[in-house]
Amino acid sequence: MEYKNVKTAIIGGGAAGLACAVQCASKLGYGSTLIIERQARTGRKLLATGNGRCNLSNRHLSSEHYYGDKAIIRSVLSGFGSEDVEKFFGSMGLLFRDDSEGRVYPYSNQASTVLDCMRLKCEKLGVEELCDFKIKTIRKSGGFFLIESETFSVKAQYVVFATGSRASSLLGANDSGYRMLEKFGIRSTPLFPALSPVSAKEKYKNLKGVRAKGSVTLTADKETIKKRFGEIQFTDNGLSGICVFEISRFVNEFFMLGKISGKPYQKISISVDVMSDFSYQELCAYLFRCKRIFSDGKASDLLSAALNRKLAQSVAQYCSLASKKCTALSDNDIKKLAYAAKNFVFTPVVTDSYQSAQVSAGGISSQYVNPETLMSKSIENLFIIGELLDVDGDCGGYNLHFAFGSAAVPVKSMK
Ligand SMILES: Cc1cc2nc3c(=O)[nH]c(=O)nc-3n(C[C@H](O)[C@H](O)[C@H](O)COP(=O)(O)OP(=O)(O)OC[C@H]3O[C@@H](n4cnc5c(N)ncnc54)[C@H](O)[C@@H]3O)c2cc1C
């Protein structure tokens, strides 16, 4: 069996693991740090981020964009702002570009540039990557961690868990990190997918692929939980798009726990407003005008000059007016149509959305790690970073920012 003795072993070569390796090796010296990666290459998920462009941070960073363990969020963000991401990657030569919503991308607009910067830096610092490494056992003995596969054994003074979550299983993600941590008595809070499409009971097959600007509002027992604006994408079995992604964590939390942010609810629904630039009264006035313009047509024609035709038809179908002739529409029907365009309701249903989710909510909380050091409270020199922790963020670079920020923490405790 091959054998390696290092100061720090990082388990998982994703966004957090690679960033942590750079910082550990910079402080502890050449050859001090090793990455253990289960897949054939490090950084596979990183390459898929931001549609291959890698939205690595956001200028409007604040704890409001994060959910989960408040103590960990506060600690990580206070030590790592968006200027720190720039400093960290800037030291590797990376240039940046921001978009109008504060999202930060590499200037190349390519995720591979971000990955290459970190891998090159790791190489220079003598960080060894052990890829295709299937961990069989991991234990602590005599003050050292022993990590073994069938053929290889690693002995390390410090171990950093950076194995990420199950989100996006098609990219090889799994929950093995949580299972390894359980062997050390470290348990996660309930896990559920976040930033995912939402499946709905109502099926509008003709809407597949239609996109519209508008708002989505998640309601639980008549209480508004979250409202988001943006581009809504209709799929053959529900809703997608960034604004839908951002309410999905609450939908999935409801299905997982019957609660949202700790409060129990019975029923949830999503109301889509496809005419969000107009008030209900303005829309009614517009549709009354359209009734004269489209006098020979059907109810769905009234919205067809404002919306994608398939969407106009589906809204009319939703309020049971699809086949009614314009001449037969009462004033009340017109108001019903206006109301439906602003309250097109979908009922979420449970699906296994881990395949398409970008992140997982839940994880290791401050019950088990010290938020200031991210070291286990019970196992000395065992650190946990990245998505394994009980923190998830909105779309817009917040999740990678957290991964990089948390990666900067453990090295402060290493000598
Ligand atoms: C399609 C997609 C697009 C995204 N786009 C963005 C974006 O633009 N901006 C943003 O902020 N966030 C984005 N995210 C979220 C972001 O990618 C994650 O939050 C981030 O990668 C988490 O970093 P991590 O290092 O904790 O986990 P990961 O990046 O998932 O890395 C974990 C690593 O550990 C390895 N591993 C797992 N188990 C083991 C094991 N047992 N032994 C050894 N190695 C193991 C994995 O193979 C992987 O390489 C996106 C996610 C997806 C899926």
Image (cartoon, rainbow, N blue to C red):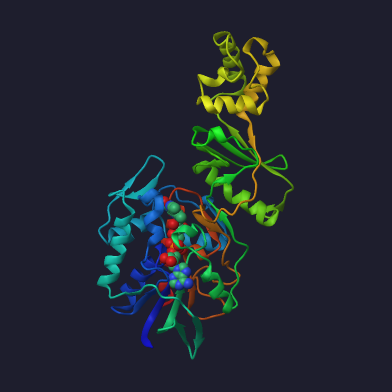
Please tell me in which quadrant of the rendered image residue 81 appears: bottom left
The N terminus: image quadrant = bottom left
Q: Is residue 79 visible?
A: no
Viewer-nearest residue: 274 or 68: 274
Residue 324's spot in the image, x, y percent?
A: 65, 17
Residue 352's spot in the image, x, y percent?
A: 59, 54
Viewer-nearest residue: 337 or 230: 337
Left-right relation of 144 to 282:
left
Q: Is residue 42 visible?
A: yes
Left-right relation of 214 to 322:
left
The C terminus: image quadrant = bottom left
Residue at horizontal 39%, vertical 54%?
48
Residue placed furthest toward the right: 266
Residue 268's spot in the image, x, y percent?
A: 68, 44
Residue 397's spot in the image, x, y percent?
A: 43, 51
Count the labels in the image.
0
| Residue 288 versus residue 62 in the image, above or below | above
Left-right relation of 283 to 138:
right
Residue at horizontal 45%, vertical 63%?
172
Viewer-nearest residue: 383 or 177: 177
Question: Ligand 1 appears in which quadrant?
Answer: bottom left
